[in-house]
Amino acid sequence: MRKLLPAALASTLFALLLPTPSHAWLDAGGEREEALHLKPDLENGQEVFEVCSGCHLPEGWGTKDGTFPQLAGQHASVLIKQLADIREGNRDNPTMYPFALPRAIGDAQALADVVAYIQKLPMNPDNGKGEWAPGTPQYKKGEELFKANCVKCHGEHGEGMPDKFYPKIQGQHYKYMLRQFGWIRDGKRRNANPDMVKQIASFSDDDEKMVINYVSRIPVPKEKLAPSTDWKNPDFD
């Protein structure tokens, strides 16, 4: 097995999920392209992920306070893109950057291995949610905003589009998504999809909270969740 450095991958490894403005949003080639076409070694991916688990937890669930996103179940293509962007300097993450470099975690093969492992992890059955439950005016407004602005890329159920590098946002923590949404809207994430930046440019802070509240409550399919005997998703039919 590939020997890994003992240092933990810094806090926001792979920092997920919403496509994030850049001149290099989807430039072809490079390490990303290489990793996408390699056959992953899941055993090594599990070993690599051990250095991520200090922040993202062994389950890959992140934290409800939004400090660390849920990685479990995310599309491998999305994770590869975000990590490659950080390694290439297209996405700013000063804390993570030195630990994401090849000398710390390995080459393109290591990327292919660890993201394949992460993609197979069952998701948190109790992700952090916004304050407005289904049936409230704020929830309904968030649903309207989501259907009018987000479905084309993220899908009706927030499932994303792996072939286009659009992340799965269902099951993601409310506070993490809220922070990233604000950064994208305000131009603080340099690798954001320019189309998304334009789409949400007119969102007010309240609009932002309501749409992310709705997203945080989109039910995750049961087969994607970790088993739980004492938990029930109130938003599932």
Image (cartoon, helix red, strand yellow):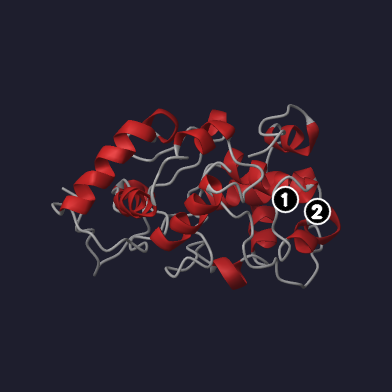
Quadrant of the image for the N terminus?
bottom right
Name the residue located 68 percent from the left edge and 61 percent from the top edge: 47
> Where does the image place residue 103, in percent across and percent down from the top left?
86, 58
Location of mark 1 (residue) = 86
Classify residue 25 as left or right of residue 184. right
Query: Which of 2 and 165 lies nearest the eye of the viewer?
Result: 165
Query: Which of 236 and 42 lies nearest the eye of the viewer?
Result: 236
Residue 226 vs 146, above or below: the answer is below
Name the residue located 37 percent from the left edge and 61 percent from the top edge: 127
Query: How much space separates mark 2 and mark 1, taking CA atoms?
Result: 14 Å
Helix, strand or loop at label 1? It is helix
> Where does the image place residue 183, in percent across and percent down from the top left?
55, 52
Location of mark 2 (residue) = 106
Specify whether residue 31 is in view: yes
The local crowd at label 2, few if under 14, some if 14 to 19, many if 20 or more residues have their Cα within 10 Å, is some
Specify whether residue 41 is in view: no
Sequence order check, earlier mark of 2 and 1: 1
The local crowd at label 1, few if under 14, some if 14 to 19, many if 20 or more residues have their Cα within 10 Å, is many
| Amino acid under disc 2 | Gly
Name the residue located 31 percent from the left edge and 45 percent from the top edge: 221
Query: Which of 197 and 202 lies nearest the eye of the viewer?
Result: 202
| Amino acid under disc 1 | Ile
Query: Which of 44 and 201 lies nearest the eye of the viewer?
Result: 201
